[in-house]
Image (cartoon, helix red, strand yellow):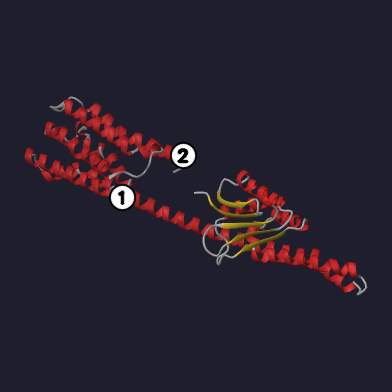
Amino acid sequence: MSDLQRACATGAALWLLSHALLPAVLGRGQGRAPVLAALALVAVLVASALVLRPLRGGPTALRAPAAWAAAAVVPLSGLAIMPFLPVEAWRTYANWWPGGTQVLVAALVVRRRRGPALAAELASAALVTAVVLRAGASDPWVRIAALNQPALLWFSASVGVRVLLDRTAREVQRYEAQAARAAAATAATAARADSARQRRADLDEGALPLLRKVAVAGAHDEAGWAQLPRAAVGVERRLRDDLRARALLDEEVRARLRAARARGCTVDVVDDRAARGGDERFLAGVRRVLAAVLPLCADGTATLRLPPHGRVATLAVEASPATTAAVAWALGARLPAQLAVDVDVDEVGGSLWAELRPHP
């Protein structure tokens, strides 16, 4: 519920509660038990304020004992007022409780406590029937129907409002799910387009120049031929990164992968999951880890892998002790807030194993 909706609902509730307070004040002095009538008014106002707590930002769930206690206020308030009124005062302000307690009943229904609310209405109807029949007034059933009219109106209306709210919530969830699927499809399409553009750029910038060098290199150009295998391996790795680990790549990671490989470190990024996509927040954290670790890799091998099962990522480094120590420090000092990590490092042997997972 938005702040505007909450403000409007609070204003409506206060206006409706005034229909218990003002009639009770206007009808004072007509009953034979004014103290009981005042206590009933206080009980109704307090119980109504408690069940209307969600309008002030409170939780919407209502425990069963509290719901039944609030429901009991409705017939008890009638018991404290109606038997002590003369017959001619039943249709005056003095007999305010049949309508004044309906805010309480409606709040119970809206908070999904329809059983206690219905029990309160039935108990109130039984009380009205018993008092009218006991008084021996003329046209008793007309009087009974008239006094029970607020209960029929408010209970049915509140049930209708609850059904409408539930249906609206379901429709909103359905539309949000459709919007999320559409956004995911759009993102997937954009990611595939970006990947295709990146592969074309790699081919244009790496593979085509390499092929041209192969075409023009002569057999006597031993220095040129010696450089070609290394260049071909670099192009192959860039293309394989995009084919096998698209979720782990962004512009920063691509640039740092190229720089690490240019320094002589063998780096692999692999996504072995059966279903691609997943938790984008987790993947964003893994990309940040890659961006922090790759500048420290100057030798040896480093492999970051998304295993086939489970929302984890593994990082394995086999390098010099200085490199593994620097990577271990980066995992502790620069780890994103959305990730937790377990690290096993052998600085003497120059090996590191880390498991990244979403922060609990």
Q: Amino acid at mark 2?
A: Leu
Q: In the rendered image, which residue does mark 2 sit on?
A: 4
* Quadrant assignment for the N terminus: top left
Q: Amino acid at mark 1?
A: Val
Q: Is residue 220 left or right of residue 173?
A: right
Mark 1 to mark 2: distance in Å? Answer: 23 Å
Decide: marks 1, 2 in contact (CB < 8 A)? no
- Relative to 114, say whether 273 is above or below: below
At numbered mark 1, what does the secondary structure look like: helix, strand or loop? Answer: helix
Mark 2 packing: few (<14 Cα in 10 Å), some, or many (20+)? Answer: few
- On the image, which quarter does residue 61 sit in? top left
Q: For the point 10% across and 42% down, which residue is it?
A: 130
Q: Position of residue 110 (x, y in %)?
A: 33, 46
State which tag comes first along the sequence, 1 or 2: 2
Residue 159: image tag: 1
Mark 1 packing: few (<14 Cα in 10 Å), some, or many (20+)? Answer: some
- On the image, which quarter does residue 70 sit in? top left
The residue lying toward the viewer, choosing from 213 and 114, is 213
- Relative to 202, say whether 14 is above or below: above
